[in-house]
Image (cartoon, grey):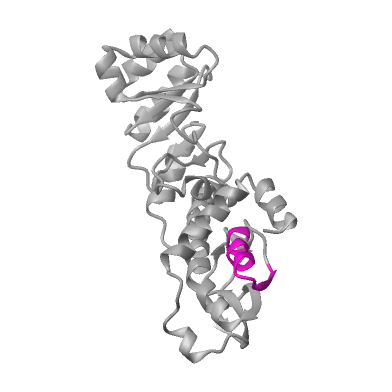
Amino acid sequence: MTPELTARLTAAGLDPQAVENLVRTALAEDGGTDVTSEPIFGPDETAAGAFTAREDGVVAGVPVAETVFELLGIGYVAKVADGDPVTAGQVLISVTGPTRAVLRAERIALNLLTHLSGIATATRRWADALAGTKARVRDSRKTLPGLRALQKYAVRCGGGVNHRMGLHDAALIKDNHVAAAGSVTRAYQAVRAAHPGLHIQVECDTLPQVEEALAVGATSILLDNMTVAETAEAVRLVAGRAELEASGGLTLDRARDVAVTGVDYLAVGALTHSARVFDIGLDFS
């Protein structure tokens, strides 16, 4: 991988070695022989082509696709940057190189580009729906194993923000923690005693739980499956003493109704676990 590509991945908040490892895993899955392309194209034959958007949306994953091209010795020129809005028919990346290599790269690059661009496009729709409010759309840990960093990166490309990356960097006290500990108070106090400086969020199903979380000192509260009216009442009760995140059953058509209550975030697991792939194709010149 070139220093320039390494620098771009790092600037995007991605680990270049992790991205390279992922691409090598994808290449290994395809095996060492392309039984279709190798009988048709000689080792010295070359091809040129373009990865082109087939619908409108937001692109993400360009430097990840470039990693595929570099590992296979394919020349490339990116025409867009991650986070850019694109339209149907717009060229995203042009490529030139050995025909066999381009065809080997095609599906792997497309798998990554279409998935990540799908997440970015979905996130942008939510971000647009919340425009003019203080609320921002946020992701969750509902990600595919091994792809979390990339999926969360795609959320950022679409204008969303990331929740915790794992179980290690922030605490989220959920219903099962509360049930096992006996109360919100006991669960919060146990985590706070073990991790004095850690960010702790408390999931609350009811308004009395919100009051209990505030009383014990919580500064971040997740409002789980509350109605818009309950969410608005929670905002009134909290009165700015804690950040509030609405979660559970949220849909794009009611996103703004929730946002205007005054919450800080809307948690949308569907950004990563249910985003439709973005339609991109490779066409030879």
**Residue located at (27% from left, 24% from top):** 176
Quadrant where the image shows the C terminus: bottom right
Magenta range: 63-79
**Residue located at (46% from left, 42% from top):** 139
**Can you give x and y, in whole percent of width and height, for residue 7 in the image?**
72, 50
Q: Nearer the viewer, residue 97 or 271?
A: 97
Q: Is residue 218 above or below residue 269?
A: above
Q: Is residue 72 magenta?
A: yes
Q: Nearer the viewer, residue 162 or 135?
A: 162
Q: Give the quarter of the image for residue 57.
A: bottom right
**Can you give x and y, in whole percent of width and height, for residue 88 in the image?**
56, 74
Q: Give the quarter of the image for residue 225.
A: top left
Quadrant where the image shows the N terminus: bottom right
Q: Is residue 125 above or below residue 50?
A: above
Left or right: where 133 falls relative to 32: right
Q: Is residue 49 above or below residue 105?
A: below
Q: Give the quarter of the image for residue 184.
A: top left
Q: Nearer the viewer, residue 61 or 68?
A: 68
Q: Is residue 282 magenta?
A: no
**Can you give x and y, in whole percent of width and height, for residue 90 in the image?**
62, 74
Left or right: where 21 falls relative to 185: right
Q: Nearer the viewer, residue 271 or 241?
A: 271
